[in-house]
Each structure stands twice: as structure tokens, then as C-alpha cells.
Image: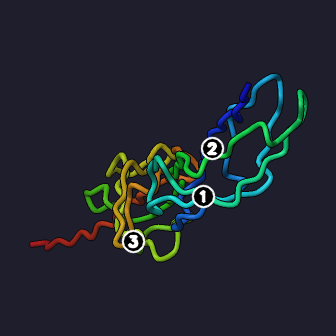
Amino acid sequence: LTITPATLSITGTKTYDGNTNFASNTLAVAGAVNGETIALTTGSGTSASANAATYAGSTLTGLAISVTGGNALASNYALPSTGDLTITPATLSITGTKTYDGTAVFNAGALSVTGLVASDAIDTATAVSQNVASNGSNYFTTFTLSTGSAANYQLASAGVNNSAQITQATLSITGTKT
């Protein structure tokens, strides 16, 4: 009679941070049997790219587990050498203020952005409306980057972390009296 170890699966999820490394606290283990609970105690993963996506078959190294309940034997389980690692988009907080110019596009100089990683830089952001609104109902719907990939980011929900303010333009009126 031969009993082979149950094979575990390892997945990982982290927010885009500009690198391919997954620390053990971003990894999850599945496949426990007989009412046992398995915890990953050490290990890491490396995705094929640092960009937001899912990478099947990513390399896993240095894995170790602890087992509680049932027989509580780590030797009853086989650890994989690969797993599926997912990088989710980072959230950008964008606020901006500009004077009415007939467009909804804000250039980088009119924006305050938090959440960009490394050398990624904002180019423009486009608001839902090009008009003056005093009730806080204007917010950004799209953005472009001058460096980096926009697919690595998502916009914060409309509100304090995503707001566009367009102020009234000053008109100059001149005339001639005859």
C-alpha cells in the first residue's frame, strides 16, 4: 500500500508595485484534507512581469507549511514549484483644479496624484464634465500616463480621492462709446 502526499496549490495576489516579487504574506495555500488546516510559513513567488495581470505557472521558491488538526503532518502534502500569481491594478487618487477652457481635459500641472509607482507619471486626466460645477459632482473618468502603463492603475471612486474642480473663467469686456 502506497500513500502519496496530497498536492497543494498556491496562489498569490498583490497590488501593482512595480516589481515581480511576491512575499509569503501575499500567497495562499489550498488543498487541505481530513479537516486539517494548512498555513504557509515561508516562501515567495516571482511573476513573469511586474504589470497588472494573472501569471499562470509562476515560479515558487522556499515554500514551507505548518499543519494543524487531523494528523498534523506536513509530510502528507506535496508543495508545488509553480502557482498562479495575480497583480491587481493600484488605485490612483487624482484631484485637479483648472479654469474653464471648454474642455474636460486637465494637464499634469493642474493635477495632484497619489498612488503612482516608481517612475510612472501622469500626463492628462479627463473629467466627466467640462463645465463649472460647485456641488462636487465633477470627477475624473480616464487618465493617460506619460511614462508607465495605464493598465496598472484604476481610478479611485468619485469623491474626495477623485474630484475635478473647474472654476469660472474671467471675462474681459471692452467697448467703445460713440
Confirm or deny contact between disc 1 and disc 2 (CB under 8 A). yes
Please report the residue visible at 67 percent of the width from the left and 52 percent of the height from the top: 26
Please, what is the three-letter code of the amino acid marked with disc 2? Ile
**Residue 121, position as x, y percentages in the image:** 42, 72
Could you tell which of marks 1 and 2 lies nearer the N-terminus? 2
Q: How far apart are marks 1 and 2 (CA)?
A: 10 Å
**Residue 86, position as x, y percentages in the image:** 52, 48
Q: How far apart are marks 3 and 2 (CA)?
A: 41 Å
Secondary structure state at the residue bearing disc 1: strand
Colouring used for the render: rainbow
Q: Considering only vertical position in the picture, is 26 above or below 171? A: above
Please report the residue visible at 42 percent of the width from the left and 51 percent of the height from the top: 140
**Residue 90, position as x, y percentages in the image:** 53, 55
Please, what is the three-letter code of the amino acid marked with disc 3? Ala
Could you tell which of marks 3 and 1 lies nearer the N-terminus? 1
Say few, some or many: other residues with alpha carbon within 10 Å of mark 2 (under 14 / 14 to 19 / 20 or more).
many
Name the residue nearer the viewer: 58 or 114. Answer: 58
Q: How far apart are marks 3 and 1 (CA)?
A: 36 Å
- Please tell me whether mark 3 or mark 1 is closer to you in this view: 1
Residue matched to label 3: 108
Please, what is the three-letter code of the amino acid marked with disc 1? Gly
Could you tell which of marks 3 and 2 lies nearer the N-terminus? 2
Query: Is 109 on the left or on the right of 177, as rendered?
Result: right
Residue matched to label 2: 10
Say few, some or many: other residues with alpha carbon within 10 Å of mark 3 (under 14 / 14 to 19 / 20 or more).
some
Say few, some or many: other residues with alpha carbon within 10 Å of mark 1 (under 14 / 14 to 19 / 20 or more).
many
Name the residue nearer the viewer: 113 or 137. Answer: 113
Secondary structure state at the residue bearing disc 2: strand
Q: Considering only vertical position in the picture, is 29 above or below 61? A: above
Q: Residue 45 carries which label?
A: 1
Please report the residue visible at 21 percent of the width from the left and 72 percent of the height from the top: 174
